[in-house]
Amino acid sequence: MSANGTDNSTSKKPPSPSPLRFSKFFQSNMRILVTGGAGFIGSHLVDKLMENEKNEVIVVDNYFTGTKDNLKKWIGHPRFELIRHDVTEPLLIEVDQIYHLACPASPIFYKYNPVKTIKTNVIGTLNMLGLAKRVGARILLTSTSEVYGDPLEHPQTESYWGNVNPIGVRSCYDEGKRVAETLMFDYHRQHGIEIRIARIFNTYGPRMNIDDGRVVSNFIAQALRNEPLTVQLPGTQTRSFCYVSDMVDGLIRLMEGENTGPINIGNPGEFTMLELAESVKELINPEVKISMVENTPDDPRQRKPDITKAKEVLGWEPKVKLRDGLPLMEGDFRQRLGVPKKN
Ligand SMILES: NC(=O)c1ccc[n+]([C@@H]2O[C@H](COP(=O)([O-])OP(=O)(O)OC[C@H]3O[C@@H](n4cnc5c(N)ncnc54)[C@H](O)[C@@H]3O)[C@@H](O)[C@H]2O)c1
Ligand SMILES: O=C(O)[C@H]1O[C@H](OP(=O)(O)OP(=O)(O)OC[C@H]2O[C@@H](n3ccc(=O)[nH]c3=O)[C@H](O)[C@@H]2O)[C@H](O)[C@@H](O)[C@@H]1O
């Protein structure tokens, strides 16, 4: 039984993996698919997976928000393959593990074409589960803290069912991810697929799109361009920010461990958006102004992960504090914006 009283057990045995997985003549014995691997988190995950010489990594991406640039150091590597493919179409390849990340993550991108976002979450996840079922692969879904909606419990534990508007402008993303989680558990119970679900909380770091609208990338780009930091009203709403290397470590531990999840992966340090703006100002550009601007509908008022389960089950907790992570991101943004640091 899970914490919220549902029976998630399955009597089915998972299908047999490819015979090559255990073959002593086969060089790299783990073929890993990363969907959305040209994006922000995906490309950092690929870097980490490629460090292991036993891994062969295949990325599929439609480049909606990702770019080949994020993977340029691996293009041409014999253990790496990059495929332009949209996950809403079926995919026939042979793999042992699937990290399923493909989905636009920034609110301005996922709201740009909401019907496509929901297709990506529902049909895309269905296709990747079909692939996992055919080849006997283990599949990990990157779900989101947005499944808790505008949470009425604080901090959020995995057993909280959430408070989500089913017809709002964010629903294509948060309801889409909720259906994706449902599909994962139905394939697990009905077909014995090995599943893992990570509920990711706001993650930041190098390679975020400069103009993707998420708060950390916005504030850093604005500070470097000496434009006012746009704090959306009321400014007292909170988020908890996780540095990308901690996130990748948590995702790999979840994939390699025995627990299906869902497991919250995030940094429990909680900040108001005004506090975040003050930190960026202090650390990156003390001259920059802060301006209060209109917010968008259904913006969650508070968010903070309870990571007790990740600590217990994965032996994982984040290491990088926000004040240490922001300067690590600054160098990458300076280089891409062409704004060198003054001495
Ligand atoms: N970054 C965060 O704070 C955060 C928080 C919670 C959950 N997540 C989840 O983590 C995953 C990665 O997020 P990210 O921040 O790296 O976002 P991102 O936008 O940088 O990466 C998403 C990648 O998926 C690709 N993609 C989108 N739709 C696709 C489709 N239909 N077919 C193939 N590829 C497609 C994009 O081109 C991009 O490369 C997403 O599933 C997101 O929902 C991220
Ligand atoms: O962690 C998550 O689960 C989700 O977090 C983010 O969604 P959100 O928290 O809305 O992220 P932002 O767009 O970065 O907004 C965070 C807060 O900053 C505020 N904000 C945003 C941008 C800005 O310029 N100024 C500003 O004050 C927003 O009003 C909001 O309160 C991600 O973009 C989602 O992909 C992800 O699934």
Image: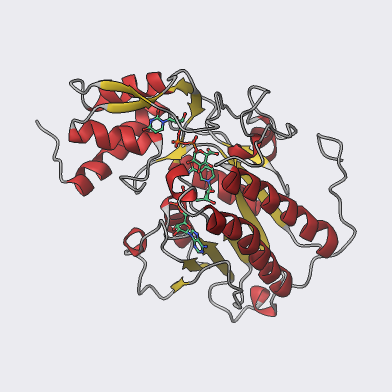
Q: Looking at the image, how many numbered discs can be counted on the residues?
A: 0
Above or below — where is 264 with respect to 44? above
- Asked if residue 100 can be seen in this view, the reply is no
Position of 134 compared to 62: left or right? right
The image position of residue 325, as x and y in percent, is 37, 33
Residue at x-position 64% and y-position 33%: 311
- Residue 122 x, y percent position in the rendering: 65, 58
Identify which residue is drawn at 84% across, 48% down: 8
Looking at the picture, tell me which residue is in the foreground, 172 or 259.
Answer: 172
Q: Position of residue 247 (x, y in %)?
A: 51, 43
**Which of the two residues, 53 or 242, is positioned nearer the viewer here?**
242
Question: Coloured how?
Answer: secondary structure
Query: Who's the residue at 35% across and 70% down the image?
Result: 75
Residue 313, given in percent of the width and then of the height, sits at: 69, 39
Residue 51 position (above or below residue 302) = below
x 26%, y 37%: residue? 221
